[in-house]
Amino acid sequence: MEWVELYNPTSSSVALSGWTLSTTGGTKTHTVTLSGAIRANDYYVFEYSRWLDNENYESVILRNADGTEIDRTPLLYDDYNDDRTRQRYPNGKDTDSDSDWKFRPSTKGYSNGG
């Protein structure tokens, strides 16, 4: 299973009904619709079998129910195929810079640290 973790840094729950995650870049493009909610200051892990293209550069894009882009990863490549993941570090850092993203050991469902 491949997975994407979303973090809600706010003090309110965020409903994900109708939100989507899409991949772009690589040889495959997939869009999946989310459901549920992310509690305040908590994590939401979306798992799906073989939907990411780990052999090519790709980006993952989060859109709300209106189709507005909320966030995206830079085009990244995983040439290690181990337990490391692309993640914002320190946890939740978002300055709209590619340098916000690091390739670090997985922290699935927990803080990325920092």
Image (cartoon, rainbow, N blue to C red):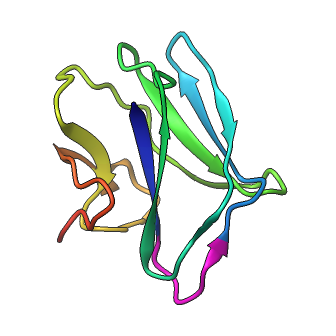
Q: Nearer the viewer, residue 74 or 110?
A: 110
Quarter in which the C terminus is drawn: bottom left
Look at 67% across and 50% down and name the residue there: 34
Toward which corner of the image does residue 53 lie, by quadrant? top left
Asked if residue 79 is among those painted magenta in the image, a careful observer would answer no
Q: Position of residue 33 (x, y in %)?
A: 71, 43
- Tell me which residue sits at (16%, 28%) in the image: 82
Residue 2 lies, in percent from the top left, at 40, 32
Relative height, residue 7 to residue 77 (above, below): below
* Residue 57 sits above or below residue 33 on the image: above
Q: Is residue 11 magenta?
A: yes
Question: How many numbered circles are shown?
Answer: 0
Percent of width and height locating residue 91: 29, 68
Magenta residue span:
8-14
Quarter placement of the N terminus:
top left
113 is higher (above) or lower (below) than 81 = below
Residue displayed at 80% across by 56% down: 65
